[in-house]
Image (spheres, rainbow, N blue to C red):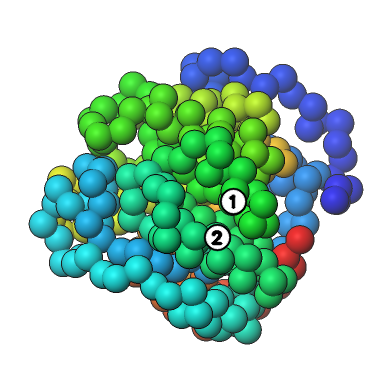
Amino acid sequence: MAHDVVPASSLVRPQPRDATAVRAIYELPLPELLFRAMEVHRRHHAPAEVQLASLLSVKTGGCAEDCGYCPQSAHHETSVAPERFLEVEEVLSAARSAQRGGASRFCMGAAWREVKDGPAFERVLEMVRGVRALGMEACVTLGMLDERQAARLAEAGLTAYNHNLDTSREFYGQIITTRSFDDRLRTIAAVRKAGVEVCSGGIIGMGESVDDRCRMLLELAALEPAPESVPINALVAVPGTPLEALPPVDPLELVRTIATARILMPTSRVRLSAGRKGLSRESQLMCLLAGASSIFFGDKLLTTGNPDADADLAMLRAAGMKGAQAR
């Protein structure tokens, strides 16, 4: 829905075609960058609405991938131990609880390298059907999958499939070696072909350059169409992972990344995702002003901490904002 809050005359700008042009946006004086992002946001989104999404790990730990940021990787010695695959009713109980708390989207993550046909995948399909029956949007992240598996998820009613690019193609090999950047793009293509919405974003603060961030955003924006959902994460440096010693992201870098994403992908729902626990209330609100229109809701994001749900609701009330309804 359009929201004619500001004149639209200055909103029509040619989209950048290379990372240099994206960096020129990213490095604008902050007042100008925020103004441009807010213009775009108001034209395509309700500026006072924030979707509350809940994320649950349905299968934790023991992943064969070596993602340098992830405590669930079997390659790293972290405090996250492999756990059993949750039963359908356990997941639906969590979904109902999240819905009562105000969440309209329920996301389920399984620490798999790829989807394998069999009882586990059948259980995921049942979870998706159950979440949709509640009237909630359903998103899953299960690793790589093929076109047939994506079609089965679509038949079950899946709203969106999350498969992040994580970082730029150029920096990707510094973070992950067990799955290629093109593997990720192939999974995204399979999801898109099945008619399921794409949820794909990245992580900042992993030692990448500003150019890497801009190249990642450009790659996302160049997808046809751009992802409907773009989570922007700040690294949570978990002990035992290769990135454990990296410093926290400067909140203004997160604001700039979100604002740039908003300008490049006007109709996408940009999600302020991991790393919020280390942000002040004011920093989080600045991210929302910069164009984020969703937060993950609940005390945990898969295996890392997240702000208390009551604190999130209080923050939104103080800002005169409210949770968005499920579609």
Q: Is residue 162 left or right of residue 156?
A: left
The C terminus is located in which quarter?
bottom right
Residue occupying image coordinates x 23% and y 46%: 64
Element on which disc 1 rests: helix
Quote the CA–CA distance across marks 1 and 2. 6 Å
Residue 203 appears anywhere in the view: no
Residue occupying image coordinates x 61% and y 43%: 151
Q: Is residue 46 above or below residue 4?
A: below
What x and y, as percent, mark residue 107? 52, 62
| Residue at image mark 1 | 153
Q: Is residue 317 left or right of residue 19?
A: right
Q: Is residue 136 above or below residue 244?
A: below
Residue type at tag 1: Leu
What x and y, as percent, mark residue 306? 40, 69
> Mark 1 packing: few (<14 Cα in 10 Å), some, or many (20+)?
many
> Mark 2 packing: few (<14 Cα in 10 Å), some, or many (20+)?
many
Which residue is nearer to you in this view: 227 or 321?
A: 227
Residue 113 appears anywhere in the view: yes
Furthest-front residue in view? Answer: 118
Which residue is nearer to you in this view: 255 or 191?
A: 191
Numbered tag placed on residue 125 in the rendering: 2
Q: Is residue 239 left or right of residue 220?
A: left
Q: Is residue 231 left or right of residue 81?
A: right
Instruction: Please report whichever mark, 1 or 2, sits nearer to the chain's N-terminal start.
Output: 2
Residue occupying image coordinates x 55% and y 48%: 161
Q: Is residue 129 above or below residue 140?
A: below
In contact (CB < 8 Å): disc 1 and disc 2 = yes
